Image (tube, coloured by chain):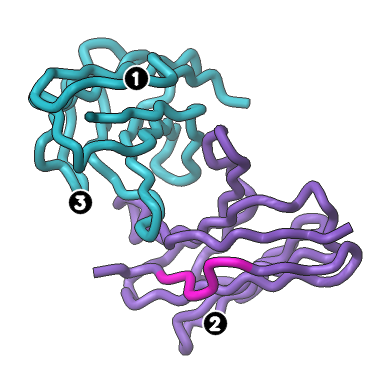
Chain colours: A cyan, B purple
């Protein structure tokens, strides 16, 4: 298995609070991604990174920001969490933008 | 707008029989297709892929078929085993661009 960890694994937060999810890799892969998984939607891309400090938006980026200051870490921030952001969040990494390897996921509940 | 569609949310198959999971796509520019398998509380894991220049790719019990004219691909698992019970996601991409995922099919293999 690719060395990908996500923290926290579970989080419950209140509407309006900021939340940061962390993805950490030990594979030195160039590409990193954040997805959310919701029933009836499969996995949808939020943001991705193609290098340190190089990031771009995915199809569902509203309400989310990301940062990548080191190759191994990719942070996803919800500036002001809303109930619609209750979801399971997956980080993925990729060496060459082809096959992606996924982390174990973070279950976020916004009350 | 869902560019990759998995119209069967679930499928049940007897152990030892063939499982066929289907996927349709709308974007004729997709040139690389992947199947991922997901167990509960884990991230998706890569299963098998196929380039648009091929119409079949086989890896052990798993075979993926691509019909470009119909914009359809299928995953065949034979023989099916109880450990194959999981959610299967189809995904597609164009060049170096990002993956688009289907909504998933839950496969149950009955012992």
Q: Main secondary structure of the magenta part?
A: loop
- Secondary structure at badge 3 equals loop
Task: Identify which residue is drawn at 35% across, 31% down.
Answer: A31
Magenta-colored stretch includes residue B7: yes
Q: Which residue is mark 2?
A: B67
Specify whether A16 is left or right of A54: left
Q: CA distance from mark 1 to mark 2?
A: 43 Å
For the N terminus of chain A, the quadrant is top right
- Secondary structure at badge 1 equals strand
Q: Earlier in the sequence, mark 1 or mark 3?
A: 1
Specify whether B42 is left or right of B64: left
Label 2: chain letter: B
Of the two numbered discs 1 and 2 in the rendering, the one whose residue sits closer to the viewer: 1
Q: Looking at the picture, do discs 2 and 3 lie on one chain?
A: no
Query: How many numbered circles does the render carry?
Result: 3
Q: Which residue is mark 3?
A: A59
Q: Which residues are magenta?
A: B5-10
Looking at the picture, tell me which residue is in the foreground, B52 or A63.
Answer: A63
Task: Identify which residue is drawn at 20% across, 19% down.
Answer: A19
Label 1: chain letter: A
Q: CA distance from mark 2 to mark 3?
A: 27 Å
Of the two numbered discs 2 and 3 in the rendering, the one whose residue sits closer to the viewer: 3
Task: Identify which residue is drawn at 39% across, 29% down.
Answer: A107
Looking at the picture, tell me which residue is in the foreground, A20 or A23.
Answer: A20
Q: Which residue is mark 1?
A: A11
For the C terminus of chain A, the quadrant is top left
Task: Identify which residue is drawn at 85% across, 55% down.
Answer: B81
Image-quadrant location for residue A69: top left
Near mark 2 (Cα within 10 A), the count class, few <14, some 14-19 or many ≥20, is some
Magenta-colored stretch includes residue A42: no
Q: CA distance from mark 1 to mark 3?
A: 24 Å
* Marks 2 and 3 close (CB-CB < 8 Å): no
């Amino acid at each position: 298995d690719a060395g990908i960890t996500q923290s926290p694994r579970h989080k419950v937060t209140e509407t309006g609070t900021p939340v940061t999810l962390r993805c950490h890799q030990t594979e030195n892969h160039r590409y990193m991604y954040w997805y959310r998984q919701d029933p009836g939607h499969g996995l949808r891309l939020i943001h991705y990174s193609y290098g340190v400090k190089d990031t771009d938006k995915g199809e569902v980026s509203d309400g989310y920001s990301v940062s990548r200051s080191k190759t191994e870490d990719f942070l996803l921030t919800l500036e002001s969490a809303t109930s619609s952001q209750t979801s399971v969040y997956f980080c993925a990494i990729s060496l060459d933008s082809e096959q992606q390897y996924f982390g174990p996921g973070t279950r976020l509940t916004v009350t | 707008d869902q560019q990759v569609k998995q119209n069967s949310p679930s499928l049940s198959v007897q152990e030892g029989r063939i499982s066929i999971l289907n996927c349709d796509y709308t974007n004729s520019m997709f040139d690389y297709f992947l199947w991922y398998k997901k167990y509960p509380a884990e991230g998706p894991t890569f299963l098998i892929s196929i380039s648009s220049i091929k119409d079949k790719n086989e890896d052990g019990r798993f075979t993926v078929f691509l019909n470009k004219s119909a914009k359809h691909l299928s995953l065949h698992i034979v023989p099916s085993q109880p450990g194959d019970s999981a959610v299967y996601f189809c995904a597609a991409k164009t060049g170096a661009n990002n993956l688009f995922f289907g909504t998933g099919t839950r496969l149950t293999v009955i012992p």
